[in-house]
Amino acid sequence: MKAVIMAGGFGTRIRELFPDIPKPLIPIGGKPVLEREVECLRKQGFTELIFTVCNQREKVMEYFGDGSRFGVSVRYFEETVPLGNAGALFYLRGELTEDFLLLNADSLFDIDFGRLVEFHREKGGKATLFTHPNSHPYDSGLILTDGDGAVKEWLTKEDPRPKYYDNRVNAGLHVLSPSVIDAAWERRHPGELPPWEKNKLQPGASAEGAGQMETAPEKWDLDRDLLKPLAGTGTMFAYNSPEYVKDMGTPDRYRAVNADFENGIVTARNLKNRQKAVFLDRDGTINYYVPFCHKLEDFHVLPWAAEEIGKINAAGYLAIVVTNQPVIARGEMSFEELDLTHKKMQTELGEKGAYLDAIYFCPHHPDKGFAGERPELKFDCDCRKPKPGMFLKAAERFNIDLSQSIMVGDDDRDMKAGEAAGCKRNILVQTNEPWDIEQFLE
């Protein structure tokens, strides 16, 4: 699979730190950020790369050459006329005949691309977005999905948003079908011959020849013009992962990314590596305990929960909720109502800078004979705590080393479930009372 890396940005926000260095060559841990990206791709077998370059492109091309020094093949599409962050795709389309990776050159990442590509192929869609939770969803663009992961809405920072939402943010890594380019052209220029047919540019050719084109070069925005129109069509999916992806486009973000790299957080979060997690009970630990809580208005996050979960985030552990929710089987709450409750939890945590990497819940209940119950959910399952089913599902999904993980809860069932899962520590806290996780994080 080819990888197209958009490396033509002007870096206006970070220019105060590096006025003479193009963004792709800004160093992270002594190496240009784009070289870090190339290393991540090469290690996973992605060696056919295309760089789209514009600002200070000569420096980028001189540094990387044909890529052989880095164990890859690099070709260039030079934009002597800025075409927007997606305009080059309309000239490269002739050689993009199969699904391809589309990445930004100003983000530091270390992810398992195999998992991303496998997800894309399983869904069979036209586009897959790599999404993740972050510590500031309130001022980030949000990706809203259905239960199958299909993108329903794509909200920018300026768009009105629901009162409660999943903390799911686009990270700028994509797997795309070439048909996405075709559809975007047809929307803007119905019936017109596209530039890849008009010009038949050879691989590595420059957009400098735009003067001879029948239509002048035009700018294309990746999100607005190519991807957002796919929302709600059932053809674009979100692959949500806790792996490390961060934009380093501002001085503050650059310093934070450097610190994360030096602390080993970047590589450690790649799901090829074994992960550590803190498993969290919900009721009485994250939110005020209300017996069989089934009303949204009765759900409130405890005042100290965001701070403690923030410590888990900062320490490089996954923060994963595992909660029994028999209110579903009892017929007191629907799956949709529970989903909204969990959106409220994520929203309130996000407003204070904390996030959850995953939420697992058990909707079952073994006791039968109650009015309004859902018989299909009334059985003795493997996921209801004190059984470890939810832990095992999370461990498989995120490659978690349970022997290096922690359980925090306010009930003996939480402790027994953590023990059954093989967690190294099981911390019993008092219901609705403050707890301190920091002393247990390594």
Image (spheres, helix red, strand yellow):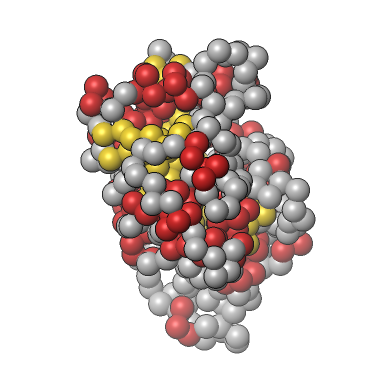
* Number of numbered discs visible in the structure rendering: 0
| Residue at horizontal 29 percent and vertical 49 percent from the top | 1
* Residue 217 versus residue 163 in the image, above or below: above
Looking at the rendering, which quadrant does residue 373 occupy?
Answer: bottom right
Considering the image in quadrants, where does the C terminus appear?
top left
Seen from the viewer's position, the closer of residues 245 and 419 is: 245
Vertical relation: 240 (above or below) 379: above
Q: Name which residue lies at 60% across and 25% down.
A: 11
Q: Quick one: 331 or 176, which is closer to the camera?
A: 176
Q: x, y percentage for residue 353?
A: 65, 36
The residue depicted at 33 percent of the width and 38 percent of the height is: 49
Q: Which quadrant of the view contains residue 162?
A: bottom right
Is residue 442 visible to the viewer in this orientation of the structure? Answer: no
Q: Can you see residue 218? A: yes
Q: Nearer the viewer, residue 171 or 418?
A: 171
188 is higher (above) or lower (below) than 279: below
- Residue 200 place in picture, x, y as percent: 38, 51
- 44 w.r.t. 386: above or below: above
Residue 137: give x, y in percent of width and height. Answer: 65, 44
Percent across and percent down for residue 341 are: 65, 61
Residue 137 in the figure: left or right of residue 277:
right
Residue at 38%, 73% (x, y): give it.
Answer: 380
Toward which corner of the image does residue 350 lie, by quadrant?
top right
